[in-house]
């Protein structure tokens, strides 16, 4: 896929947009996440950070479920989150409050490529307690 084709697809995506998808690969249960076919020419992926701690609770290959667009940037891949709470980490609400506190206001907004993260943004995301209270 060309960068132009990816930019065209990404321009039609919205945060929180729901796709029915099929889990096509769980390469390292408990380690990296799952790959999901959502019917587009670009792959979908759910990061391990969004999934339950126990990989036995992850959707298995062949599972058909709804997935929401969580992120899409210059990489030719759509980051997804499961719509079904059974497939989300148990502290998802707290997690979102730490790493994407404005998620509810982002839902429905166009997915744009924000470019690379600044060093302080990366440090903030990697902190165990999330971004500092003064973060935007």
Image (tube, helix red, strand yellow):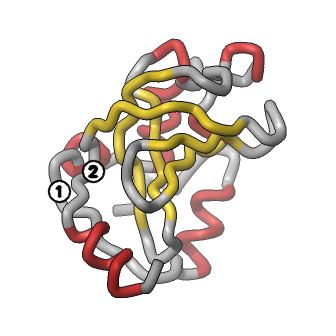
Q: Is residue 104 left or right of residue 86?
A: left
Q: Is residue 54 left or right of residue 4?
A: right
Relative vertical location of residue 88 with respect to residue 104 in this rendering, above or below: above
Percent across and percent down for residue 27 are: 79, 41
* Between discs 1 and 2, the one toward the N terminus: 2
Q: Residue at x 42, y 39 (%)?
A: 97
Q: Residue at x 37, y 75 (%)?
A: 6
Relative vertical location of residue 70 with respect to residue 25 in this rendering, above or below: below
C-alpha gap between disc 1 and disc 2: 6 Å
Relative vertical location of residue 109 with respect to residue 118 in this rendering, above or below: above
State the SS at label 2.
Answer: loop
Percent across and percent down for residue 61 are: 66, 26
Q: Nearer the viewer, residue 129 or 86?
A: 86
Label number found at residue 15? 2
Residue 112 sits in which quadrant? bottom left
Q: Quadrant of the C terminus?
A: bottom left
Percent across and percent down for residue 23 are: 57, 32
Instruction: Answer whether labels 1 and 2 touch (C-beta < 8 Å).
Output: yes
- Pointer 1: residues within 10 angstroms few (<14), some, or many (20+)? few
Relative vertical location of residue 110 with respect to residue 56 in this rendering, above or below: below
Q: Residue at x 49, y 43 (%)?
A: 37
Q: Is residue 16 left or right of residue 88?
A: left
Q: Residue tagged by mark 1?
A: 109
State the SS at label 1.
Answer: loop
Q: Nearer the viewer, residue 25 or 97?
A: 25
């Amino acid at each position: 896929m060309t960068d132009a084709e990816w930019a065209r697809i990404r321009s039609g995506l919205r945060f929180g947009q729901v796709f029915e998808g099929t889990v096509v690969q769980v390469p390292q249960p408990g380690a990296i996440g799952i790959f999901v076919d959502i019917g587009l020419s670009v792959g979908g992926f759910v990061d391990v950070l969004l999934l339950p701690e126990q990989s036995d609770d992850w959707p298995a290959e062949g599972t058909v479920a709804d997935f929401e667009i969580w992120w899409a940037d210059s990489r030719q891949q759509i980051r997804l989150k499961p719509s079904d709470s059974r497939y989300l980490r148990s502290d998802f609400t707290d997690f979102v409050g730490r790493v994407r506190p404005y998620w509810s206001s982002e839902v429905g907004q166009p997915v744009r490529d924000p470019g690379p993260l600044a060093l302080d943004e990366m440090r903030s995301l990697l902190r165990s307690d999330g971004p500092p209270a003064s973060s935007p």
